[in-house]
Image (spheres, helix red, strand yellow):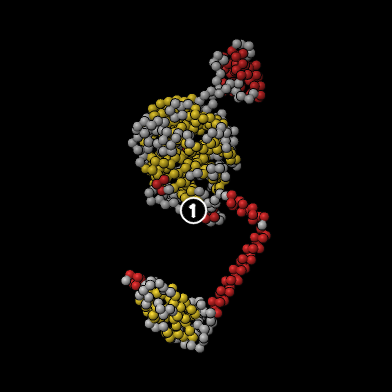
């Protein structure tokens, strides 16, 4: 084990393991994490491509050690761990898609083999090979007839005929003698594989296998009998898929195809419901929440479930692989993107959260529980290396918008409610009577402004505001009432708001109901007021009524030489709780 310099990730990841000579050559579709022994300790399951023509193996790692190895007959196209029964202990099986077959392993041993059904054979092709078997035509004539059939027939030729057409002249006789007595078969191969919950969304619920084939078909297989439950057709060959929902309730299969488009299949629909045409071929597909992230050659695109494009990011290097990062304990849903410049970038929406620098180009990514650690990132490199990183428990991810432009808040989608019938009717009424409504609105607005202006002028003329409108005596006053009753302390804070001129010859007078209140000092003279200072004036108010009611007390600030008050304050007195309790 050796450590790797992970500068650039902000210290969020721990380097758990790096083996540059592990000899693992695989992709993200052929790697998974699963508890294969029922001891709550997850293992790493890898479908190794070997040299491409030999050495294909199913490898299982526990920690840093290789604990199991099974040979595969063909290149693995995908690998998933799924629960196929309700037996205890709850141990998942591993399904490996290889060629036209699915190999199911349970307890790290071969358990079942499922083979795709054979395809229909072109009757003209069958007749031609029958004539060869009976010696009616020679290999030269056979080649000419097969070429003619391939150009005109609706049903494609079998692998045997296509192989025969690709041979040189000196090899055709031997090929015909070798295969002419064998029956013709046309077999497709599996291109991608996924899992679909059967009836419940539980983590250990029974799951169906979903496979895509070279014949542009999608099959849903029963997990117990391995029979075909559902068959759907696509316009092109599927290469990647993402599955969500339950088969017995409602499900959605998002498929990226070889023609550069994404199709969405739903329950009780034999053909795609939506189609998303991409600007280039997809190299990665990951689901984040209810939305899909599609990795193209040089950018990431984010789509909603209905196929609407939400945003895109231009990346610094071509995308090599992608995987979703779901950490429920921290409420984090993001996507990991492997780039050709030896970097792995972590994005939440279109915001870059972290960048991991690697010693080699990453070919596969898998995030989940490995061993007993929930936040584990497993990666394989182009040179066959194995890298394991663990997310620190203290790691904090802050949104960093790496692209210049508008602020992040501008990209937040508003939760706009659906249009109701009342809204539609109101919109139609506004269109028909727009001019009259506009005039009525401006008339009401003008009336409101006039009423506000009249009230303001009246308040200024009668000094009904707590701030003086006089330029010679600019004053401000506020009142504070303290106590529960029947005796209250009333404090008046008076301030001269002039810049440099003092004010004198002022007094305070109270207007109140004699039957309810009695004030100790109903008339107080105010000394000279220095600008800027707040002068408190205190007096005591006694409630003389036992009926539990309250009233207003009006406070006037007067000038000895003027008949109207400079300012007025209305004090809402509280109910005397002392009299109520007594």
Measured from the top left, where is residue 488 in percent x and y?
37, 76
Measured from the top left, where is residue 88 in percent x and y?
35, 32
- Residue tagged 1: 400
Q: Is residue 123 above or below residue 394?
A: above
Q: Is residue 58 left or right of residue 170?
A: left
Give neighbour class at mark 1: few <14, some 14-19, many 20+ (Cα, 10 Å). Answer: some
Q: Quadrant of residue 45?
A: top left
Quadrant for the C terminus in the image: bottom left
Give the camera-side residue of 446 and 179: 446
Measured from the top left, where is residue 459 in percent x and y?
54, 76
Give the camera-side residue of 104 and 22: 104
Q: Can residue 494 be seen in this view?
A: no
Q: Is residue 89 left or right of residue 331?
A: left
Give the camera-side residue of 294 and 475: 475
Residue drawn at 44 percent across, 29 percent down: 223
Residue at far bottom of view? 561
Q: Is residue 572 above or below residue 5?
A: below
Quadrant for the N terminus in the image: top left
Q: In this view, does 483 lie above or below 363?
A: below
Residue at far left of view? 582
Q: How many labels does the image show?
A: 1
Measured from the top left, where is residue 292 in percent x and y?
52, 43
Mark 1, secondary structure of its residue: loop
Q: Is residue 88 visible?
A: yes
Residue drawn at 50 percent across, 88 percent down: 561
Residue drawn at 47 percent across, 81 percent down: 556
Residue drawn at 52 percent across, 54 percent down: 408
Give the camera-side residue of 341 and 308: 308
């Amino acid at each position: 084990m050796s450590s790797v310099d992970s500068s650039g990730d902000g210290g969020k990841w721990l380097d758990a393991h790096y083996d540059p000579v592990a000899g693992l050559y695989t992709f993200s579709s052929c790697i998974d994490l699963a508890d294969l022994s029922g001891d709550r300790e997850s293992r790493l399951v890898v479908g190794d491509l070997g040299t491409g023509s030999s050495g294909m193996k199913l490898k299982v790692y526990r920690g840093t050690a290789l604990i199991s190895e099974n040979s595969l007959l063909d290149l693995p196209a995908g690998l998933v761990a799924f629960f196929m029964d309700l037996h205890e202990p709850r141990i998942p099986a591993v399904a490996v898609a290889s060629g036209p077959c699915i190999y199911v392993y349970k307890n790290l041993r071969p358990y079942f083999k499922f083979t795709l059904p054979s395809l229909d054979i072109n009757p003209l092709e069958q007749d031609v090979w029958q004539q060869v078997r009976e010696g009616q035509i020679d290999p030269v004539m056979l080649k000419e007839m097969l070429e003619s059939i391939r150009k005109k027939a609706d049903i494609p030729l079998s692998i045997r005929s296509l192989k025969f057409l690709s041979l040189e002249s000196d090899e055709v006789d031997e090929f015909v003698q070798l295969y002419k007595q064998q029956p013709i078969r046309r077999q497709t191969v599996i291109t991608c594989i996924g899992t679909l919950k059967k009836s419940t969304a539980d983590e250990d619920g029974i799951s169906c296998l979903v496979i895509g084939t070279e014949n542009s078909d999608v099959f849903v297989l029963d997990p117990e009998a391995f029979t075909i439950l559902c068959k759907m057709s696509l316009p092109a060959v599927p290469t990647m898929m993402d599955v969500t929902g339950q088969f017995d309730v409602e499900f959605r299969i998002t498929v990226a195809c070889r023609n550069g488009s994404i199709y969405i299949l739903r329950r009780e629909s034999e053909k795609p419901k939506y189609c998303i045409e991409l600007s280039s071929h997809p190299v990665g597909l990951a689901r984040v929440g209810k939305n899909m992230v599609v990795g193209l050659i040089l950018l990431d695109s984010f789509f909603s479930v209905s196929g609407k494009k939400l945003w895109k990011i231009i990346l610094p290097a071509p995308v090599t692989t992608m995987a979703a990062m779901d950490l429920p304990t921290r409420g984090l849903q993001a996507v990991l993107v492997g780039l050709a410049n030896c970097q792995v970038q972590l994005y939440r929406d279109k915001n870059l959260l972290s960048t991991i620098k690697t010693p080699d180009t990453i070919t596969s990514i898998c995030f989940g529980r490995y061993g007993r650690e929930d936040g584990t990132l497993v990666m394989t490199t182009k040179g066959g290396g194995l890298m394991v990183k663990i997310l620190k428990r203290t790691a904090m991810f802050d949104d960093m918008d790496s692209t210049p432009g508008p602020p992040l808040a501008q990209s937040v989608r508003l939760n706009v409610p659906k249009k109701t019938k009342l809204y539609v009717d109101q919109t139609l009424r506004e269109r028909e009577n727009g001019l009259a409504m506009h005039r009525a609105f401006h008339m009401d607005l003008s009336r409101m402004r006039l009423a506000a202006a009249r009230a303001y002028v009246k308040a200024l003329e009668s000094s009904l505001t707590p701030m003086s409108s006089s330029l010679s005596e600019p004053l401000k006053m506020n009142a504070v009432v303290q106590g529960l009753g029947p005796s209250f302390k009333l404090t008046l804070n008076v301030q001269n708001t002039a810049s440099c001129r003092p004010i004198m010859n002022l007094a305070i007078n109270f207007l109140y109901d004699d039957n309810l209140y009695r004030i100790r000092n109903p008339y107080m003279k105010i000394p000279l007021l220095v600008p800027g200072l707040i002068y408190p004036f205190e007096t005591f108010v006694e409630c003389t009524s036992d009926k539990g009611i309250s009233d207003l007390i009006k406070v006037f600030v007067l000038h000895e030489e003027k008949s109207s008050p400079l300012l007025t304050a209305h004090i809402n007195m509280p109910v005397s709780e002392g009299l109520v309790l007594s």
